[in-house]
Image: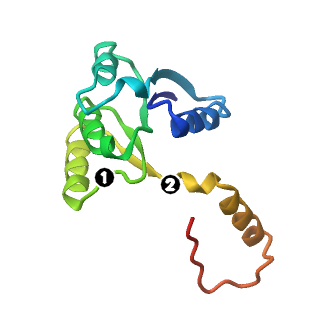
Amino acid sequence: MKIAILGMGFMGKKHKAILNTFPDVEIVAEIDPELMDDASSDALDSFFAQNINCDLVVIATPNHLHFPQAMRLLQKGYSILLEKPFCFSLREAGTLEEISARNQCNVYVVAQNRYAPAAQFLKEIISENKLGKLYNLQFNA
């Protein structure tokens, strides 16, 4: 699978480190976050101009850029993986759904806290049944 990462800040680097553990994944592009000041950034335009062939673009940019960048990528036919929040309103979510359906591409959303030490600890104790039968669980990170 060929993957591009849009945003190489903290979360972009985390995605890269995790993706590098999969032998069938090739990171074909890393787009520098410092060049992305808005949705019409030179970095995203440059990415499109290079016509990079990939199966998925991971969007790991600041939250306020998620929707406009996702929209542009979907309009070009790229499947995307978005950090939460993937958008700020139901209208935006509907727009992304519409564009992805029209262009036959996918939108995936990831909650990165599953890699947090507290989440890993909780997963371990639940998997090992150390808490017994659970009826309700709330986890605020």
- Looking at the picture, tell me which residue is in the foreground, 54 or 5: 5
- Looking at the picture, tell me which residue is in the foreground, 30 or 25: 30
Residue 58: x and y, percent?
44, 36
**Residue shown at 44% from the left, 23% from the top:** 32
- Looking at the picture, tell me which residue is in the foreground, 70 or 99: 70
Q: CA distance from mark 1 to mark 2?
A: 13 Å
Q: Residue flagged by tag 1: what amino acid is it?
A: Cys
Q: Residue flagged by tag 2: what amino acid is it?
A: Ala
First reached walking from the N terminus: tag 1 or tag 2: 1
**Residue shown at 34% from the left, 13% from the top:** 50
Residue 135: x and y, percent?
62, 86
- Looking at the picture, tell me which residue is in the foreground, 49 or 103: 49
Check disc 2 and report the residue beneath it.
111
Q: Quadrant of residue 106?
A: top left
**Residue 18 shown left or right of residue 131 in the figure:** left
How many marks do you count on the picture?
Answer: 2
Check disc 1 and report the residue beneath it.
87
**Residue shown at 76% from the left, 64% from the top:** 124
